[in-house]
């Protein structure tokens, strides 16, 4: 959104415009530039960023931006000039506009972290927090290098998970479509053949009668079934997006044996690497826990971290509440305790992250090799039930006709 303001700066009255996501954000941006607004109002027209389709910036673009920006800053190139160079290099129109807006805010006196924080579609909370810590500690180039490595690690893990889930998702979709197709189009024709062979008084097996009844029901109520399915899925997705629904859904996932193992290991790896990165950047423990909890990916585990943060606020070491957790395994709290004693929390947690990322890789590889035979068995069972329901009565009736 674009805002028009009348303000004072250094005792002088000035007029101008500012782009921000809200009026409060606009006032905050002006305050960082030592501009004190007298009046501020929304003006017509969308900002340059709003005119573009909002979408996630590609991981590859973000990694290249972060690494190259780190190299330029460590070489002594001023931040403004570095951002201008990066803007010219990116081919992503949305990201190009975002970088331009960030550069403009930085030139106007806003800190680099605050300028990035105005664009959550491109830079998440971890990114902004680490940049803020790097700015305050004077180690922005080093922090950007760590950020690039972390972004690559997260992208690699997501890619492996998506790759492992692609096959079963496709097979499951094909199975559902095939089931509906067979029940609506194939079974009725076969049912007519069976009735022609045996006559109206022919006795059919229970499972065949059940199959024909289901087929008749699906044909008669196909539109209602589709509406109920679509409506049910839509309502379920909306409920899952609510805080309560998301918590309940994540709690349910943690009760499914294989899924629970994968989710917990991914969450532990993400917790260890993110928390270590924030701690090494000089972020306070409570702030690091808050940021880490927000990006852990599971609301139940996030609640555990918030409970642990409350105990840390009361003077306890983080390893103490985590040692009582039903989700965090003892190895995490024990290694964290060693890190607290030696002052090397970041180094030790990086090792924990590496360990659990290897565990995730092993579980996903094992799951991939296990899913294929399971899906084949499921498909085979479905085909077998349909074949038995259809071919058995046909063979029996054909024999009776032959006699």
Image (spheres, rainbow, N blue to C red):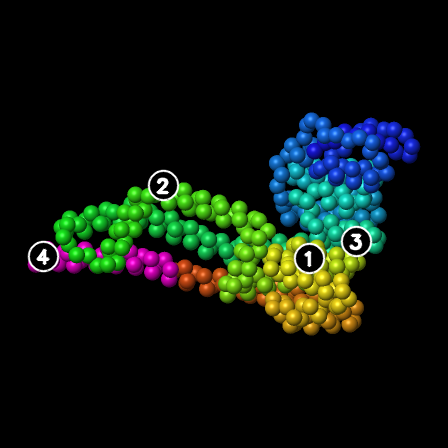
Q: Which mark is residue 133?
A: 3
Q: Which residue is mark 1?
A: 292
Asked which secondary structure carries label 3, the reply is: helix
Give the Cα distance between marks 1 and 3: 15 Å
- Dots 3, 4 in contact, CB < 8 A: no
Q: Which mark is residue 402?
A: 4
Question: Earlier along the polypeptide chain: callout 1 or callout 4?
Answer: 1
The mark closer to the camera, 3 or 4, is: 3
The mark closer to the camera, 1 or 2, is: 2
- Quarter of the N terminus within the rendering: top right
Question: Earlier along the polypeptide chain: callout 1 or callout 3?
Answer: 3
User: Are there few (<14), some (14-19), or many (20+) residues within 10 Å of tag 4?
Assistant: few
Question: Earlier along the polypeptide chain: callout 3 or callout 4?
Answer: 3
Q: Residue at x 24, y 55 (%)?
A: 209
Give the Cα distance between marks 1 and 2: 46 Å
Q: How many marks?
A: 4
Q: Which residues are magenta?
A: 377-403
Q: Is residue 367 magenta?
A: no
The mark closer to the camera, 3 or 2, is: 2
Q: Which residue is mark 2?
A: 223
- Dots 1, 3 in contact, CB < 8 A: no
Q: Residue at x 77, y 66 (%)?
A: 315
- Dots 3, 2 in contact, CB < 8 A: no
In this rendering, position of residue 237 left or right of residue 280: left
What x and y, as percent, mark residue 399?
13, 58
Nearer to the camera, 292 or 276: 292
Question: Earlier along the polypeptide chain: callout 2 or callout 4?
Answer: 2
User: Are there few (<14), some (14-19), or many (20+) residues within 10 Å of tag 3?
Assistant: many
What x and y, as percent, mark residue 79?
81, 44
């Amino acid at each position: 959104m674009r805002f028009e303001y009348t303000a004072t700066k250094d005792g002088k009255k000035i007029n101008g415009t500012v782009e921000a996501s809200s009026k409060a954000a606009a006032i905050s941006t002006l305050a960082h530039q030592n501009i004190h607004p007298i009046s501020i109002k929304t003006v017509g027209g969308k900002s340059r960023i709003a005119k573009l389709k909002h979408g996630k910036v590609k991981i590859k673009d973000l990694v290249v931006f972060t690494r190259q920006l780190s190299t330029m800053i460590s070489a002594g190139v001023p931040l403004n000039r570095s951002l201008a160079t990066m803007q010219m290099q990116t081919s992503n129109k949305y990201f190009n506009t975002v970088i331009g807006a960030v550069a403009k805010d930085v030139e106007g006196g806003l800190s680099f972290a605050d300028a990035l924080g105005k664009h959550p579609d491109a830079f998440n909370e971890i990114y902004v927090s680490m940049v803020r810590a790097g700015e305050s500690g004077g180690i922005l180039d080093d922090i950007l290098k760590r950020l690039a490595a972390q972004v690559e690690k997260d992208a690699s893990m997501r890619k492996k998970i998506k790759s492992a889930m692609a096959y079963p998702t496709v097979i499951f979709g094909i199975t559902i479509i095939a089931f509906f197709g067979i029940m609506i189009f194939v079974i009725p024709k076969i049912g007519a053949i069976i009735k022609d062979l045996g006559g109206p008084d022919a006795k059919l097996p229970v499972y065949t009668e059940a199959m024909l009844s289901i087929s008749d029901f699906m044909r008669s109520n196909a539109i209602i079934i589709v509406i109920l399915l679509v409506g049910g899925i839509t309502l379920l997705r909306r409920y899952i997006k609510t805080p309560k629904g998301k918590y309940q859904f994540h709690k349910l996932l943690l009760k499914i044996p294989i899924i629970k193992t994968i989710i917990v290991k991914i969450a532990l790896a993400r917790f260890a690497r993110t928390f270590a990165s924030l701690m090494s950047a000089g972020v306070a423990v409570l702030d690091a826990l808050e940021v880490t909890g927000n990006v852990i990916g599971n609301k139940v585990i996030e609640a555990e971290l918030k409970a642990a943060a409350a105990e840390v606020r009361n003077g306890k070491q983080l390893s103490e509440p985590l040692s009582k957790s039903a989700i965090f395994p003892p190895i995490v709290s024990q290694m964290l305790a060693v890190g607290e004693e030696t002052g090397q929390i970041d180094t030790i947690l990086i090792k924990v992250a590496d360990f659990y990322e290897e565990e995730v890789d092993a579980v996903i590889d094992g799951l991939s090799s296990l899913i294929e035979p399971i899906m084949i068995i499921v498909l085979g069972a479905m085909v077998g039930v349909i074949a038995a329901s259809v071919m058995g009565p046909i063979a029996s009736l054909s024999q009776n006709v032959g006699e």
